[in-house]
Amino acid sequence: MTAHIIVEHLYVEAGPTEQPVTIVDDVSFSLQRGEVLALIGESGSGKTTIALTLLGYARPGCRIIGGSVMVGKDNMADKAESQLAGLRGRKVAYVAQSAAAAFNPSRRIMDQVVESALMHGLMTRKEAEAKAVTLFANLSLPSPETIGRRYPHEVSGGQLQRLMAAMALICDPELVIFDEPTTALDVTTQVDVLKAFKVAVKATNTTAVYVSHDLAVVAQMADRILVLQRGRVVENNPTDRILNDAEHPYTQQLLNAVQNNDTVQNKEHSDVVLDIGDIEAGYGKITKAGKPEIPILSGISLKVLRGQTVGIIGESGSGKSTFARVIAGLLPASAGYMVLNNQELPSAIADRGKRECQHIQMVFQNADTALNPSHKVADILGRPLTFFHGLKGEAQKERVAELLELVKLPVALADRKCGALSGGQKQRINLARALAAEPSVILCDEVTSALDTVVAAAILDLLEELQARLNIAIVFISHDISTVKSLCDEVLVLYKGKKVEHGSGSSFACAPYHPYTDLLVSSVPTLDPEWLDSRKRDLDALDISVQNTDDLCRFRDRCPVKLGDQCNTEAPPLRTLTSGKSVLCHRDQAMLVAQ
Amino acid sequence: MKVIFQLIIKRIGLSIITLFIVSAVVFFIANLLPGDAAQEMLGQSATPEAVAALREAYGLNDPPLTRYAKWLTGLVTGDAGMSLANSRPVSELISSRLSKSLLLAGLTTVIAVPFAMLLGIVAAMYSGRRVDKIMNIATLSMVAVPEFLLATIFVLIFAVELNWLPSLSYIPADAGVYEYFRAFALPVATLCIVLSAQMARMTRAAVLEQLSQPYVEMALLKGSPLSRAVLRHALPNAVGPIVNAVALSLSYLLGGVVIVEVIFNYPGVASLMVDAVTNRDMPLLQACAMLFCTGYLILVLIADLSAILANPKLRTGG
Amino acid sequence: MMAAIKSMPMSGKVGAVLAACWLFLALFGPWLAPHSANEIVAYDVFEPLGGDYILGTDYIGRDVFSRILDGTRFTIFIPLLAAALACSVGTLIALYSAVSHPRTDEIISRFMDALISIPSKIFSLVMIAAFGSSVPILLTITAISYMPGSFRIARSLAVNVANLDFVTVARTRGESRLYLAVKEILPNILHPMLADFGLRFVFVVLLLSSLSFLGLGVQPPEADLGSLVRENLSGLAEGAPAVIVPAIAIATITIAVNLVIDSLRGAATYAARGR
């Protein structure tokens, strides 16, 4: 049997024709009908570019300059645009990374889902809509009959991603391209979407190409994995082989970055650096009741000890970044207190003195926007030195060199503008700037989530090492529970602005957890290919009511182990478990263990 | 629905506030100046008594704020005061001319808007190709050309050399369609060219902005031809910015009309206003200025309201 | 600078060369002129091109070429100064607004929006009626009419930059608003504001020429290019170059600058996309 997809000696280049850059360099692979191939690599590895050539498409500025891309009998690389239009959507379909951006905001979902079927003249509108409804049901979407009447902004991100899969499958394509379809989703949402994709693809015996940077996700989906680095294939093997017996050192590096599971050693901590109590905060005007119009955080307390790492974990909408802004004084709390180094800390930055500002430093997620592109590295690091410590001239220059060395960057970088640096380098500069102030606390807001896996792992190592050396407290904010578990001495779980669980890092090593934490922990894909099939589904309602103000459990709509009426009527108590951690739940220790 | 209603009310309220600020700016610039309108009207030889009497008659002795309040209430009730130059009510002078200016502007709009949209959309669809590049340079040049150059060239070609059309825009009382066409051809053509160039550029930018969105790439990858992706996907989302572009350009029309009316000796409000400047006829000038500013604000308001209505997020109240 | 011009498309290079020529003429025009601008050199009025006088003579027999060389000063320098004023004042107010309390920002923006809604020609007419039209007043009027536009652009750029994390970092450091505005925000909006400056220049050239054309701009005995068109309008019927040439001269100035800005913008978006 000849392969369904055969790509041979594919070259793609980008940039102006006078001085092109080769971004896909002699890539060949083949794929049998019904197989799922994963393209994995970091940003710039050419994985999306390769996937798009299967549709005969190159993004503006890129050109296919050589090789063949056979899908069945059609060579997508040398077809005219008009011929390609007839094949796209019908024979080869595409599921894009961000469904929120890939759906036209001004048209109803159903119109967009059935569009390709109508365009290619495959069925009548009625047939197409009936088929769409079946697909919605197969993809476990809520209210399949009516969801199509909505506009894209009226459904959740995870639902939109599945609706896009329906859009791709409507014409029964031979090949579906999934381009990082779950990267923008929360981890608890990702599971459902992955499951829905897997079922849909297997049921129709569709060939699929799955693009991702996440090895654990790919392990669930793919029969074969193609590892890419800088536009070249470094390894192409069945999934089992890659996971258990990787040949190429780069693949091993990727695997190690995922399996980074060193446990926390319990360090000796003494004095409290930052003491935060009963914080309430939100946006909008303050109402008569003394609460903000849009309340985000309620009743958050936390003690940070010198040299300790405290992890704050939550998904989008949990209020974790708001919490960082409150500590930094950017968003003054409407109630509660903060004490820094035994002195009361004013809630608004305008009321804080220079010393108070110095002792709390913030490191942002996106190093691209966190560094002023028009400044040189030396200026970026030099400013806090002058501002806080009055260092100028030679002394400042020396200290900048020391700082660069501290974050393991060459001193020569000082004279460069930061636009020219790589993502990892920028994040190190970002960190060095915070260190330059010699703070007591560093707030790290998702510092690794914009980075490639291997680079992120290196940054985390650096963070640990620096903390051990400098004895700084770190508040580490993340959506990634496995990173937090392995890095933090203390962990706090936020859900919709409330603390649902709080305890030492080691107490998070195993159950019992709060039901939400349990969902989080169990939603993180592992390298075990069987993992996905063993997962149970999350509850998925079309309209999750937003109750952010009452004292009832805010997780109750999604909770798989809800206790009937009690959860709907009574506020949950804060229980202390034997492991020393506290959990906000009606279930007691025994029940939590049993879940 | 409630959300959108509130938004619209808020938007209209803002326009009224803006108009209020504008009226204050116009009034105080025109009145708090060293010159003395009464003296000017009567000439240097006037007796001080005559000047004082006139000042009294026109209320020029009141404190500025009182005068402003009087003027503003007058405007709202349709009484813009008396023209200093020819002692007729300002409202009468303007109303005899307003319809003519509106006709000129209306004709220009009807022709220029569809033409410009077509140019803009085509240029966006073929962006980076030869058609687009040529159109880019052409429209870029047209926006930079002073109206009087276009007008004089047109007159030179069509009136002087070919002798097809009159160089002045005069409409006899019993004019038929043909006379109307002859009278309007050159002024309308002049305004249309500058205006369409501007609108076409803005339309192109608005459509191009949408074309770079992932959902357009998605439409292409669903097998939709470029024309469909542009017309069915990009265009509906570009409506807001395009209407905005049209409104901004039409406001430009208000300025362009000044030159064109003067060149072709067209009896509209703009040429009336230029006369008011030469005569320093402040009541007339203020009223004309307010008329133009109100026209502009109404256009922008319409643009904003259509943008609100075109946005499904707001329409569905989400 | 030279590199920027080199990387431009053909149209941009043509524009740059033209603009440079005009700047040269504006600086040295009066010395290059064969005759004095106000000297009556011929008995024949409205002489055609290419006779004794390259660009013919005007309505009272003065040398058109010399008058254009003399008038270019006004058409270039008044707008240059006015645009510089409008842009710098607009940018400064925008920076202040962007780092101020939201309420201050709101008040300033509201007021500027009101000013923008007075079309520039209408505003100028009211100002001229009130204050007359000497060169300093024309400069002030044109600068004020285009300042709110500059403010609006600069503010939207500044607000975008002010929301970026590096400004937040500086803010958490406790930096003063002056530092935020000048050191963190300004360098990042300078480049687009230069393009805006070019655009304002074109607007002012057109406005000033129009005013002069209406007889309300530069007053005799001085004359800018717009005034030249006006004073020779009676020659239009015979197709005299004295009317058309100054008008074309204005167009070449504005088109040249527009071409340069357009190619700079093209280059900037190209660079921003990283291709």
Image (cartoon, coloured by chain):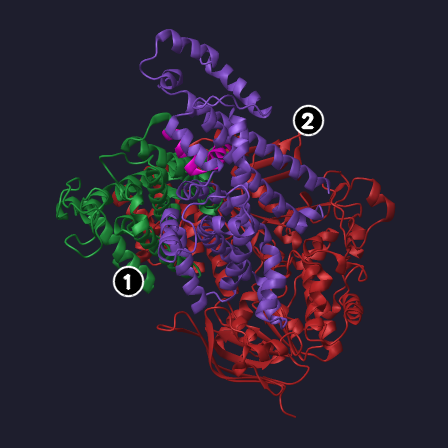
Chain colours: A red, B purple, C green
Residue B35 locus on image (x, y percent): 35, 19
| Numbered circle sitting on residue A114 | none
From where the camera sits, is residue A442 visible?
Answer: yes
Disc 2 vs disc 1: which is toward the camera? 1
Between residues A363 and C85, which one lies in front from this camera angle? C85
Q: Position of residue C252 (x, y in %)?
A: 30, 53
- The answer for how far apart the CA atoms under marks 2 and 1 are is 63 Å
- Asked if residue C110 is among those painted magenta in the image, a careful observer would answer yes
**Residue ID at (54%, 17%):** B70
**Image quarter (top left, top right, bottom left or bottom right) of the C terminus of chain C:** bottom left
For the residue pair A277 and A95, the one nearer the viewer reads as A95
Residue A230 rendering spot, x and y as whole percentages? 45, 73
- Inspect the image, locate mark 1, and give the three-letter code of the amino acid beneath it: Lys
Tell me the magenta residue range: C109-128
Query: Is A363 placed above or below B88 here?
Result: below
* Amino acid on which the number 2 mark rests in the picture: Lys
Give percent across and percent down for residue B121: 53, 61
Height in image: B249 above or below B207? Answer: above
Relative placement, left or right, of C74 versus B193 is: left
The verdict on a common chain for dots 2 and 1 is no
Asked if residue B201 lies in the magenta stretch, the reply is no
For the residue labelled by badge 2, is the local secondary structure a helix, a strand or a loop? Answer: loop
Q: Above or below — where is A427 with respect to A340?
A: below
Whether residue C4 is visible to the viewer of this picture, yes or no, is no
Which residue is at 14% across, 48% downward? C32
Q: Residues within 10 Å of mark 1 (few under 14, many from 20)?
A: few
The quadrant where residue A396 appears: top left
Query: Can you tell which mark lies on residue A288?
Result: 2
Which residue position is annotated with label 1? C6
Principal secondary structure, stretch drawn in magenta: helix
